Protein backbone atom coordinates (compact mmCIF):
# COMPACT_ATOMS: atom_id res chain seq x y z
CA UNK A 1 0.00 0.00 0.00
CA UNK A 2 1.41 3.40 -0.99
CA UNK A 3 1.95 6.35 1.30
CA UNK A 4 0.08 9.60 1.07
CA UNK A 5 1.66 11.79 -1.60
CA UNK A 6 3.29 15.07 -0.54
CA UNK A 7 0.22 17.24 -1.30
CA UNK A 8 -1.91 15.05 0.98
CA UNK A 9 0.68 14.97 3.75
CA UNK A 10 1.12 18.76 3.76
CA UNK A 11 -2.64 19.30 3.62
CA UNK A 12 -3.03 17.16 6.72
CA UNK A 13 -1.20 19.92 8.63
CA UNK A 14 1.12 17.83 10.83
CA UNK A 15 4.00 19.40 12.77
CA UNK A 16 6.52 18.29 10.13
CA UNK A 17 5.16 20.69 7.54
CA UNK A 18 3.87 23.43 9.82
CA UNK A 19 6.02 26.49 10.39
CA UNK A 20 6.81 27.62 13.93
CA UNK A 21 4.36 30.36 14.93
CA UNK A 22 7.15 32.17 16.73
CA UNK A 23 8.98 32.74 13.41
CA UNK A 24 6.10 34.90 12.13
CA UNK A 25 5.46 36.90 15.30
CA UNK A 26 6.36 40.20 13.55
CA UNK A 27 3.62 41.55 11.32
CA UNK A 28 4.97 43.97 8.71
CA UNK A 29 2.36 46.72 8.42
CA UNK A 30 2.14 50.50 8.35
CA UNK A 31 -0.11 52.33 10.84
CA UNK A 32 -3.56 53.03 9.39
CA UNK A 33 -3.43 56.86 9.34
CA UNK A 34 0.02 58.01 10.41
CA UNK A 35 0.89 61.67 10.84
CA UNK A 36 4.16 63.17 12.00
CA UNK A 37 7.40 61.34 12.73
CA UNK A 38 8.33 57.85 13.98
CA UNK A 39 11.66 56.68 15.48
CA UNK A 40 13.59 53.48 14.73
CA UNK A 41 14.04 51.77 18.12
CA UNK A 42 15.79 48.56 17.11
CA UNK A 43 16.96 46.38 14.22
CA UNK A 44 15.66 42.80 14.49
CA UNK A 45 16.70 39.49 12.93
CA UNK A 46 13.63 37.43 12.00
CA UNK A 47 14.00 33.78 10.83
CA UNK A 48 10.85 34.12 8.71
CA UNK A 49 12.16 37.09 6.68
CA UNK A 50 15.19 37.39 4.41
CA UNK A 51 15.73 41.06 5.34
CA UNK A 52 16.37 42.55 8.81
CA UNK A 53 13.33 44.25 10.33
CA UNK A 54 13.07 47.74 11.81
CA UNK A 55 11.06 48.22 15.01
CA UNK A 56 9.52 51.69 14.90
CA UNK A 57 7.88 53.68 17.69
CA UNK A 58 5.14 56.01 16.50
CA UNK A 59 2.64 57.84 18.70
CA UNK A 60 3.37 55.43 21.63
CA UNK A 61 2.62 52.47 19.34
CA UNK A 62 4.97 49.94 17.71
CA UNK A 63 5.02 48.69 14.12
CA UNK A 64 7.52 46.78 11.98
CA UNK A 65 8.82 47.29 8.43
CA UNK A 66 11.62 45.66 6.39
CA UNK A 67 14.76 47.73 7.09
CA UNK A 68 16.13 49.84 4.25
CA UNK A 69 19.76 50.00 3.16
CA UNK A 70 21.63 52.48 5.37
CA UNK A 71 19.16 52.48 8.26
CA UNK A 72 20.52 53.15 11.79
CA UNK A 73 18.89 52.91 15.20
CA UNK A 74 17.47 56.23 16.36
CA UNK A 75 16.72 57.39 12.80
CA UNK A 76 13.52 59.38 12.20
CA UNK A 77 10.85 58.12 9.78
CA UNK A 78 8.61 60.80 8.31
CA UNK A 79 5.00 60.16 7.23
CA UNK A 80 3.80 63.65 6.37
CA UNK A 81 6.37 65.73 4.55
CA UNK A 82 6.89 65.07 0.86
CA UNK A 83 10.63 64.92 1.38
CA UNK A 84 12.33 62.22 -0.72
CA UNK A 85 14.63 60.78 1.93
CA UNK A 86 15.45 57.11 2.51
CA UNK A 87 13.00 55.51 4.93
CA UNK A 88 10.17 58.03 4.55
CA UNK A 89 6.72 56.46 4.03
CA UNK A 90 4.82 58.38 1.33
CA UNK A 91 1.90 57.99 -1.03
CA UNK A 92 2.85 57.04 -4.58
CA UNK A 93 1.42 60.29 -5.96
CA UNK A 94 4.00 62.23 -3.88
CA UNK A 95 6.99 60.20 -5.13
CA UNK A 96 8.77 61.43 -8.29
CA UNK A 97 9.59 59.22 -11.29
CA UNK A 98 12.80 57.09 -11.15
CA UNK A 99 12.70 56.86 -7.33
CA UNK A 100 13.52 53.47 -5.76
CA UNK A 101 10.78 52.23 -3.42
CA UNK A 102 9.69 49.04 -1.62
CA UNK A 103 6.94 47.57 0.60
CA UNK A 104 4.19 48.92 -1.68
CA UNK A 105 0.53 48.62 -0.69
CA UNK A 106 -1.72 46.59 -2.96
CA UNK A 107 -4.70 48.74 -1.96
CA UNK A 108 -4.62 52.00 -0.01
CA UNK A 109 -4.42 51.21 3.70
CA UNK A 110 -3.59 47.47 3.56
CA UNK A 111 -0.19 48.01 5.24
CA UNK A 112 2.26 46.97 2.50
CA UNK A 113 2.28 43.85 0.30
CA UNK A 114 4.78 44.03 -2.57
CA UNK A 115 8.63 44.01 -2.56
CA UNK A 116 9.78 42.95 0.92
CA UNK A 117 12.66 40.50 0.25
CA UNK A 118 16.28 41.45 0.98
CA UNK A 119 18.05 43.62 -1.59
CA UNK A 120 14.98 44.25 -3.75
CA UNK A 121 13.29 47.47 -4.85
CA UNK A 122 10.89 48.82 -7.45
CA UNK A 123 11.18 52.01 -9.50
CA UNK A 124 8.43 54.52 -10.24
CA UNK A 125 8.34 54.40 -14.05
CA UNK A 126 5.37 56.49 -15.22
CA UNK A 127 2.20 58.26 -14.08
CA UNK A 128 -1.03 58.06 -16.08
CA UNK A 129 -4.02 59.84 -14.54
CA UNK A 130 -4.64 58.43 -11.05
CA UNK A 131 -2.53 55.34 -11.67
CA UNK A 132 1.17 54.95 -10.94
CA UNK A 133 3.19 52.33 -12.84
CA UNK A 134 6.01 50.64 -10.93
CA UNK A 135 8.82 48.66 -12.52
CA UNK A 136 8.97 45.59 -10.27
CA UNK A 137 12.11 43.51 -9.48
CA UNK A 138 10.84 40.99 -12.10
CA UNK A 139 11.33 43.78 -14.74
CA UNK A 140 7.57 43.89 -15.36
CA UNK A 141 5.40 46.96 -14.82
CA UNK A 142 2.51 46.91 -12.37
CA UNK A 143 -0.27 49.47 -11.97
CA UNK A 144 -1.06 50.91 -8.52
CA UNK A 145 -3.54 53.38 -7.05
CA UNK A 146 -1.95 56.80 -6.43
CA UNK A 147 -2.94 56.66 -2.73
CA UNK A 148 -1.02 53.43 -2.02
CA UNK A 149 1.94 53.98 0.30
CA UNK A 150 5.56 52.85 -0.10
CA UNK A 151 8.94 53.34 1.56
CA UNK A 152 11.70 55.29 -0.18
CA UNK A 153 14.88 53.24 -0.66
CA UNK A 154 16.03 49.63 -1.15
CA UNK A 155 15.47 46.70 1.23
CA UNK A 156 18.58 45.92 3.33
CA UNK A 157 20.44 42.61 3.09
CA UNK A 158 21.35 42.73 -0.60
CA UNK A 159 24.46 40.56 -0.06
CA UNK A 160 22.38 37.55 0.95
CA UNK A 161 22.68 35.86 -2.47
CA UNK A 162 26.36 36.67 -3.00
CA UNK A 163 27.60 33.94 -0.66
CA UNK A 164 26.74 30.44 -1.95
CA UNK A 165 24.89 28.08 0.39
CA UNK A 166 27.44 25.23 -0.27
CA UNK A 167 26.01 22.77 2.28
CA UNK A 168 22.58 21.15 2.14
CA UNK A 169 22.29 21.52 5.93
CA UNK A 170 22.29 25.32 5.69
CA UNK A 171 19.52 25.24 3.08
CA UNK A 172 17.59 22.83 5.32
CA UNK A 173 17.50 25.32 8.20
CA UNK A 174 16.68 28.27 5.91
CA UNK A 175 13.66 26.43 4.52
CA UNK A 176 12.63 25.01 7.89
CA UNK A 177 12.49 28.48 9.42
CA UNK A 178 9.93 29.54 6.81
CA UNK A 179 7.99 26.26 6.57
CA UNK A 180 8.95 25.71 2.92
CA UNK A 181 8.97 22.30 1.20
CA UNK A 182 12.59 21.23 0.67
CA UNK A 183 14.12 19.14 -0.84
CA UNK A 184 11.52 18.72 -3.54
CA UNK A 185 11.52 15.33 -5.26
CA UNK A 186 10.39 15.29 -8.88
CA UNK A 187 7.11 13.40 -9.27
CA UNK A 188 8.37 11.17 -12.11
CA UNK A 189 11.27 9.98 -9.91
CA UNK A 190 9.09 8.38 -7.21
CA UNK A 191 7.37 4.99 -7.36
CA UNK A 192 4.15 4.46 -9.30
CA UNK A 193 2.22 3.80 -6.11
CA UNK A 194 3.30 7.09 -4.50
CA UNK A 195 2.25 9.59 -7.19
CA UNK A 196 0.08 9.76 -10.34
CA UNK A 197 3.24 10.59 -12.34
CA UNK A 198 5.31 7.87 -10.65
CA UNK A 199 8.10 5.91 -12.46
CA UNK A 200 8.06 8.27 -15.45
CA UNK A 201 8.01 5.34 -17.87
CA UNK A 202 6.05 6.15 -21.01
CA UNK A 203 4.45 9.20 -19.47
CA UNK A 204 4.14 12.84 -20.36
CA UNK A 205 3.33 14.40 -16.96
CA UNK A 206 2.33 17.81 -18.36
CA UNK A 207 -0.45 16.28 -20.46
CA UNK A 208 -2.51 15.40 -17.36
CA UNK A 209 -5.38 17.82 -16.70
CA UNK A 210 -6.75 17.62 -13.15
CA UNK A 211 -10.45 18.11 -12.51
CA UNK A 212 -11.27 21.36 -10.75
CA UNK A 213 -12.89 19.59 -7.82
CA UNK A 214 -10.12 16.99 -7.49
CA UNK A 215 -8.80 16.31 -3.96
CA UNK A 216 -5.18 17.30 -3.06
CA UNK A 217 -3.80 13.84 -3.90
CA UNK A 218 -5.18 13.97 -7.44
CA UNK A 219 -4.65 17.67 -8.17
CA UNK A 220 -1.43 17.32 -10.18
CA UNK A 221 -0.39 18.24 -13.72
CA UNK A 222 -2.10 21.12 -15.48
CA UNK A 223 -4.35 22.91 -13.00
CA UNK A 224 -7.14 25.03 -14.52
CA UNK A 225 -5.34 25.37 -17.87
CA UNK A 226 -6.44 28.23 -20.10
CA UNK A 227 -5.81 26.08 -23.18
CA UNK A 228 -4.76 22.53 -23.97
CA UNK A 229 -3.10 20.82 -26.92
CA UNK A 230 -0.06 21.62 -28.96
CA UNK A 231 0.67 25.23 -29.89
CA UNK A 232 0.51 25.78 -33.65
Image (spheres, grey):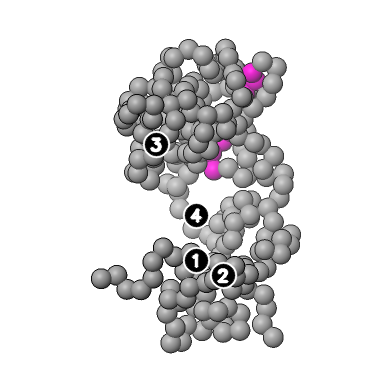
* Label pair 3/2, CB-CB below 8 angstroms: no
- Residue that label 4 marks: 165
Please tell me how crowded label 2 is: few (under 14), some (14-19), or many (20+) other residues with Cα within 10 Å: some
- For mark 1, give the secondary structure: loop
Say if 177 sits above or below 65 in the image: below
Among numbered discs 3 and 2, the one appearing first in the sequence: 3
Q: CA distance from mark 4 to mark 2?
A: 32 Å
- Between 72 and 131, the one lying in front of the other is 131
- For mark 3, give the secondary structure: strand
Among numbered discs 4 and 1, the one appearing first in the sequence: 4
In the rendered image, residue 32, in percent from the top left (x then y), is placed at 61, 24
- Between 171 and 64, the one lying in front of the other is 64
- Between 69 and 106, the one lying in front of the other is 106
Among numbered discs 4 and 3, the one appearing first in the sequence: 3
Among numbered discs 3 and 1, the one appearing first in the sequence: 3
Q: Residue furthest right?
A: 15
Rendered image: mark on residue 223? 1
- Residue that label 2 marks: 219
* Label pair 4/1, CB-CB below 8 angstroms: no
* Label pair 3/1, CB-CB below 8 angstroms: no
User: What are the residue bounds of the magenta stretch?
Assistant: 50-58
Amino acid sequence: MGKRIIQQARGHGSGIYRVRKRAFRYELKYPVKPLGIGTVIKLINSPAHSAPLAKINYDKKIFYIPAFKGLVEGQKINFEEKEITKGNILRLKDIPIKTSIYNIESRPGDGGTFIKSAGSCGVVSRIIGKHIYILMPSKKEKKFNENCRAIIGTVAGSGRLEKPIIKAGKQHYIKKGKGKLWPRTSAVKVNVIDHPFGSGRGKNPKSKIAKRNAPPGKKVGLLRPRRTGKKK
